[in-house]
Image (spheres, grey):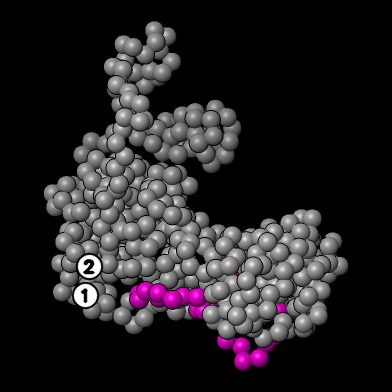
């Protein structure tokens, strides 16, 4: 097949070069040249045409927004409830979903289960595997107890062949496992390179929009936790889901971080079992480690991302450090930790300057909401002092630079969930204090960090 000519374009200045160079010849930036298929035909620089645009294309009809009928998108539930929850109800016709996560976390397992469910619900599904052989996928399906499945399998990594197969078989939904192994013949870059990933994703997205076939792309995650390949991938697709969780623990979270067809930050919870992923419909207590006695450096918070409250244990370890003490956080924002330590020092007189500080959200869950602040601070203080918080204690609330404690959204729901699980003492922002008492729960409402510290000292 004759290859289209490719050029290398600078992501900084847009300058081009016929071959790859380390340094952009136009702006001098390093490592910014990305391979692209050159646009064929005349009029490449049309937009600068001095004679105006009228001769280049016909004007298109426009319509007032009010005259356009809004249509609900048609969704087909996959039948896997926790997955449908994050998708916003199910698979959308022509929708493109990107699903990312660490290796071995369960992406292929979940998608194989979902495709089988969709196939049985009457949606023909095509599973394109580039990472494993057909035999390996068959082995997994046997393990999942779906070896009689009618899901069509294609072991292929070349984009053009994949697109031709989709065209010939006309499935309703296609899984590409993974986008990093897929490569296009049109580019000379290696599979997995930024140029290849971007080009393949763009073609598949265009195919989805043109045909109404739903496409699910599996993406790898880098060490830093971002999807490998360009951020542009996240912009191209309709929905971005991330797998979270510790591969050593049984539980996995799937979080929607972008969804054009549903709510973001919705969470699906699964447990990895011997027979694949099983939905956990009542996940509120799975991120607590079961201490028989309260231990220093641990504080429970209620997080509410998506629609369900979940109790998560925040752990801190403060230990004397060297000349440049370390700050490390797992599952929580590192910059925010530095900020909270400064607030602790300035407003509550708790100094950790010469200490190593480690914080961790139990179970590999990632908490991005600032409502974790108060629990992080209390866990740090508890570890520094070597004094455990009382049994049945929890705290949540955002902390500002001035030492103020700000309310968390939907505080009542969080408190009710905690009470349901047998928690008995809570330190919460004043604005979150319920008007009517919650049975079994003593609530201390605070406005400032120092107040929270005093409350803890009083009840500890
Ligand atoms: P996999 O879906 O291959 O992960 P990914 O595609 O994200 O890389 O998951 C593989 C892991 O899950 C592997 O460590 C084995 C485990 N597993 C189970 O525990 N039970 C099962 O039924 C299956 C299919 C896998
Ligand atoms: Mg896989």
Separation of residues labelled 1 and 2 (CA atoms)? 7 Å
Was residue 258 drawn as part of the magenta stretch in this picture? no
> Does any atom of ligand 1 lie closer than 8 Å to the CB of label 1?
no
> Does any atom of ligand 1 lie closer than 8 Å to the CB of label 2?
no
The quarter of the rendered structure image containing the C terminus is bottom right
Tell me which secondary structure the magenta stretch mostly adopts.
loop
Determine the image quadrant of residue 112: bottom left
**Residue 347 position within the rendered picture, expressed as x and y whole percent measured from the top left:** 83, 62
**Residue 91 position within the rendered picture, expressed as x and y whole percent measured from the top left:** 29, 56
Q: Is residue 153 visible?
A: no
Q: Mark 1 and 2 residues: CB-CB less than 8 Å, in contact? A: yes
**Residue 161 position within the rendered picture, expressed as x and y whole percent measured from the top left:** 21, 49
Q: Residue at x 76, y 55 (%)?
A: 401
Give the crowd class for mark 1: few <14, some 14-19, many >=20 residues within 10 Å: some
Question: Residue most toward the bottom?
Answer: 292
Q: Nearer the viewer, residue 42 or 396?
A: 396
Of labels 1 and 2, earlier in sequence is 2
Question: Residue most toward the front?
Answer: 436
| Residue at mark 1 | 146
Q: Which stretch appears magenta? A: 277-303
Question: Residue most toward the top?
Answer: 51
Q: Is residue 48 visible?
A: yes
**Residue 309 position within the rendered picture, expressed as x and y whole percent measured from the top left:** 52, 69
Instruction: Describe residue 450's horizontal placement relative to residue 152 as left or right.
Output: right
Q: Nearer the viewer, residue 140 or 393?
A: 393
When the figure is inspected, residue 203 is found, relative to residue 435, above or below; the finding is above
Q: Residue at x 78, y 65 (%)?
A: 449
| Residue at mark 2 | 116
């Amino acid at each position: 097949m004759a290859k289209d000519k490719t050029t290398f374009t600078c992501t900084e200045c847009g300058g081009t070069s016929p071959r790859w160079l380390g340094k952009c010849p136009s702006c001098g930036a390093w490592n910014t040249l990305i391979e692209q298929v050159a646009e064929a035909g005349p009029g490449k620089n049309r937009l600068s045409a001095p004679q105006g645009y009228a001769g280049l294309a016909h004007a298109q009809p426009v319509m007032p927004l009010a005259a356009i009928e809004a249509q609900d998108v048609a969704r087909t539930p996959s039948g896997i409830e926790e997955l449908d929850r994050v998708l916003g109800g199910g698979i959308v016709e022509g929708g493109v979903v990107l699903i990312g996560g660490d290796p071995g976390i369960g992406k292929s397992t979940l998608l194989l289960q979902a495709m089988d469910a969709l196939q049985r619900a009457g949606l023909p599904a095509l599973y394109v595997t580039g990472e494993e052989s057909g035999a390996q996928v068959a082995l997994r399906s046997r393990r999942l107890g779906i070896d009689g499945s009618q899901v069509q399998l294609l072991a292929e990594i070349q984009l053009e062949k994949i697109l031709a197969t989709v065209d010939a078989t006309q499935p309703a939904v296609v899984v590409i496992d993974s986008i990093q192994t897929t490569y296009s013949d049109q580019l000379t870059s290696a599979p997995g390179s930024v140029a290849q990933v971007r080009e393949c994703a763009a073609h598949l997205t265009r195919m989805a929009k043109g045909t109404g076939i739903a496409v699910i792309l599996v993406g790898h995650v880098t060490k830093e936790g971002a999807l490998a390949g360009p951020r542009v991938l996240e912009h191209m697709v309709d929905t971005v889901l991330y797998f979270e969780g510790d591969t050593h623990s049984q539980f996995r979270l799937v979080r929607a971080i972008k969804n054009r067809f549903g709510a973001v930050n919705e969470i699906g919870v699964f447990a990895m079992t011997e027979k694949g992923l099983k939905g956990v419909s009542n996940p509120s207590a799975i991120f607590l480690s079961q201490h028989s006695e309260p231990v220093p450096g641990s504080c429970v918070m209620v997080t509410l991302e998506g629609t369900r409250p979940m109790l998560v244990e925040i752990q801190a370890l403060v230990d004397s450090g060297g000349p440049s003490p370390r700050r490390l956080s797992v599952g929580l924002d590192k910059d925010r930790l530095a900020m909270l330590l400064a607030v602790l020092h300035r407003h509550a007189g708790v100094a950790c300057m010469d200490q190593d500080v480690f914080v961790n959200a139990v179970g590999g869950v990632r908490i991005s909401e600032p409502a974790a602040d108060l629990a992080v601070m209390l866990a740090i203080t508890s570890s520094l002092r070597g004094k455990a918080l009382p049994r049945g204690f929890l705290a949540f609330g955002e902390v500002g630079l001035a030492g103020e404690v700000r309310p968390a959204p939907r505080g009542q729901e969080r408190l009710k969930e905690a009470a349901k699980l047998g928690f008995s003492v809570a330190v919460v922002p004043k604005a979150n204090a319920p008007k009517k008492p919650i049975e079994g729960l003593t609530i201390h409402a605070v406005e400032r960090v120092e107040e929270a510290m005093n409350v803890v000292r009083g009840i500890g």
